[in-house]
Amino acid sequence: MSHTSPHITPPKAATRLLLRFIKDELAEEVLGDLEEKFLKTIQTKTAKQARKNYWYQVIQYIRPFALKKLKLPGLRGQNPFDMYKHYLKISWRNLVRSKVFSSIKIGGFAIGIAACILIALFIQHEASYDRHYVDGDRIYRIANNYQSEDGSEMWVNLHGPLKPVLEESFPEIEKVSRAVLWSWGNAGENHIRPINSRQNIYDEGFFYADPELLEILEIPMVYGNSREALTAPNSMVITKSKADKYFPNENPVGRQMVLNDTPEDTYTIGGVMEDFPSNSHLQGDFILTLAERKTGPGTSGWCCTNYTFYLKLTPGSDKVALEDKMVKLRDTYLLDKFLEAGMTDVEDLKKHQSYYLQPIANAHLNPEHIYDSQVHGSHDLLWIFGTVAVIILIIACLNFINLSTARSVKRAKEVGLRKVVGSVRSSLIYQYLAESVFYSLLSVMVAALIAYLALPLFNTIADKSLSIPWTSAWFIPSLLLISLLIGTLSGLYPAFYLSHFNPIEALKGRATSGIKSSFFRSAMVVFQFTATVILIIGALVMHRQFEHYMDKALGFEKEQVINLLGVNTLKETEREVLREELLRLSEVENATLGDYLPVAGGAITNFGFQVEARKATDPGFEAARWRIDEDYLSTMGMELVAGRNFTKRASDEEGIIINERMAQGFALEDPVGTWLVDMFDGRYQIIGVVKDFHFESLTSNVRPLAMVLGKGQSTISVKVKTEDMQASIAAISRVWKDIKPNQPIRYSFMDERFELMYTDLARIKQLFLTFSVLAIVVACLGLFALSAYTIEQRSKEISVRKVLGASVSRIFTLLATDFVKLVIIASLIAIPAGWYLMDNFLNDMANRIELSWPIFTLATIAAFVIALVTISYESIKAALMNPASRLRSE
Amino acid sequence: MKETRLGDFEEVILLLVGILDEEAYAFKIAEEFESQTERSVSIGAVHSTLNRLGEKGFLTSEMGESTAERGGRRKRIYSITASGQRVLQESRDFKVSLWNQFPAFASGNLKIEWLNL
């Protein structure tokens, strides 16, 4: 007993805790030490602090050397580690004894998990876009929000002069920046050279922005600072990688670069920024300033909506309130400006349109479906792939369960014997759970390896640069957690099933699997094949849809058309000379100078149009407006359904050719001769109507299109006569070299650019196909092992039948029928389900195919064939077996 | 145990065992560590290290007498073994040899130190 303060003692609970975990032989000395420490502490500190310290000291004793050997409930008196070692040994022996079976079990599981790992990485990357900003919750894009009975629509483009208005009107807006992200002025692609160099180099990733953008998007700078880098007129900021390309090993701030050999387009580098991270929705390498520009981007007024707006709000400001205030501002102030600028449908705008602030984190996946000119991930796609991943995982888990229970007869004797020597059911359950976790651990390891090996392929298909985050803190632990989780989940049923056998029955060899379990197994096979057939249907539908796009009559000729790019660096007269020189070549059939192309990468302009006679009553609509020359339609193989093409006559300056869709839009019976006016009061008379052709992606419908006479600046399209593209290119290159020796020729084939518009779709198709095949493989592995098992069980029956004279084909039919029945049931479920799902999927697309029976028949037949091939190996083997060998054994 | 390397903390604990001699038991060693280094340490951490040093063969221990402050419980007294002595010696020789190769120190020419004075 203590002499100093007998009434204060160490906390009893802590002592009890210590005695619970500490080794018995250490208890005396440790308790003594801790009590001494407690008494010592009390002399200098309060009793409370001393007690707290005692607790701390006790917790600090939770160290391996001091801990008692663990005892698990239900295993009293045994060493549990020995028991687990034993389980592991038995698992391993079982694994080795039936190698094919085990490798199917582990392999199937591993393939499923590997697919999930890849999909999870993909989803994680897609979801990580634009999460890196410190003030991410205050950064927004402004979108127009049009809501009416006919549907809703959102898009980003806004009026340029809105910027100062926003800055002055709303104190909660900290910074505003506009950006021009579509091909206007020098945005997009250019030929560029440092001012003291002669060689023009093609580069892309140009866009315009206000100086504030650097600060709003918190773009880290390598040289210069983000506040001033873009403030000077004609300044630009380039990325680190471009700085290294043009000015290796130097600080390029203050250096000048010339765009497209045009002295007016000389830009001074105001700063160098870090490259945009791969998970930023905004990508690009050259930011040109909008500050104090005299022409083009940055100067358009209230007429036109050319800008994407980025905002940074002050901390704590209310986004919804600001949206409302912006609508108020528009109604009280902006509408007058719109009217002055010639807007016609003001009432409609007032009634249906509002503003929406999109959080920057949504900008990539864009769940709001805001229309802009950027490349987006797809929210729906993530859901589709996530679902596919889960389905594959379920198929793999079911395999595992199925195969484990299928082996039950083999293990029944083991269970019986264990029970006879005194094992209780709970420890048998433990054993089978441990075994299943052991298997899933092996599978996860194999899966990680498969994922690692398959990643480069996956990256190619998905056009990503993902890597497996081996070193990150969460990756390995979450893999372990997953293997524990699915090991336990898929081990539960087999564990309870296997451990329930009556030992006497089991030892007599009478523990058959029973009707209930065979029903359960059949149900699992049906589920697996239902999922498989649906995936096959999905892959087929996507393939058909894609082919449909590729083969669709587009209304223009994309074959044998070469686009000669980057001619904007030539003087206008030179361009004409080039065109004439090209026409003189024997290979060339036709050539046109036009920037507007019906494939990816063409110029885009939209104008509002009205019929002049109905100007007061009909607000008209927006249409794409192209400038083409008189050779354009013939070069592209576009067809006029009425009127005539442009000629060199001067009167054609006022002529306009519209497409059928636009004629319908105006409800014109005989459009030729009608006068139209555009939003800038330009007057045009319709001289021709062109047959509708798809000038944008086929995933949307053909929009109205109006074509006026004008020369392009950057692209010459050449229609060649021969199939021999090599020779044509060579001839064209020679002509180019004579005219523009300081710039390498750059060209593209129009059919390739056409296909480029569908790379996303092709990618989705490819991914879906890949994962469907994976699902099929996993399901087949399961079916194979299952067939091997059931056939083995029936081997005696088969032998007897053979002795009695059954033919090989008769026995094969007998065995196959069971499985074929299951596949039929699966198909019956899968066809309506697949029909419903795919119909929904296609509904979002224009020019969709109609679902037809061939797709479903093909999918069913494919599932049939796959199933039959899978089971035939074992079935035929069984049918060919010598019956004596099996019957002799007893 | 094959492992015969000596960690920093282990070395300090080993030295403290030597210093405390008859009084070298976990609580006292922890107290001494705290007062000499002005760093706090839990008794459990010291005990664990003592245990490890024992496994490496640098320490032996036996149960000592009981005292009243400990509720009549006995304490485990540690003492350094011959190999413990040797490993301490080696560690010191190694550091001295390193210091001797350090030119600023070897020549006694620590200019910055002088300037600061």
Image: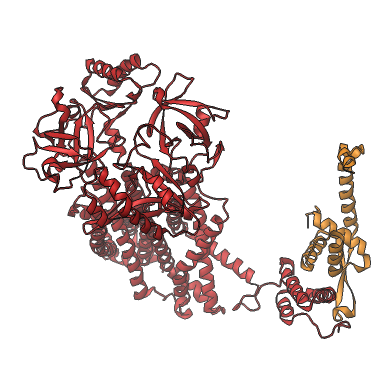
Chain colours: A red, B orange
Q: Nearer the viewer, residue B58 or A610?
A: A610
Left or right: A652 as drawn, with respect to A116: left
Which residue is found at the position 48% from the left and 79% from the top?
A503
Residue A107's x, y, as percent? 45, 55
Residue A802 in the image: x percent, y percent?
29, 63
| Image x and y of residue A32, in percent | 83, 76
- Seen from the viewer's position, the closer of residues A586 and B115 is B115
* Relative to A66, A486 lies left or right: left
Instruction: Name the quarter where the C terminus of chain B is drawn.
Output: top right
In the figure, is residue A673 to the left or right of A679? left
Q: Residue at x 78, y 58 (%)?
A: B1
A687 sits left or right of A442 in the view = left
Outermost top residue: A738
Does A668 appear above or below A107?
above
Location of residue A774 with respect to B31 vertically, above or below: above
**Up/down of A332 relative to A282, above or below:** below
Question: Does the rendering let one see residue A558?
Answer: no
User: Image point 30% across, 16% down: which residue?
Assistant: A735
Q: Residue furthest bottom?
A: A7
- Residue A33 seen from this side: yes
Picture coordinates of residue A578, whole percent (x, y): 28, 18
The image quadrant of residue A837 is bottom left
Q: How many marks?
A: 0
The one of A545 and A486 positioned closer to us in this rendering: A545
Q: In which image quadrant can residue A605 be found?
A: top left
The image quarter containing residue B104 is top right
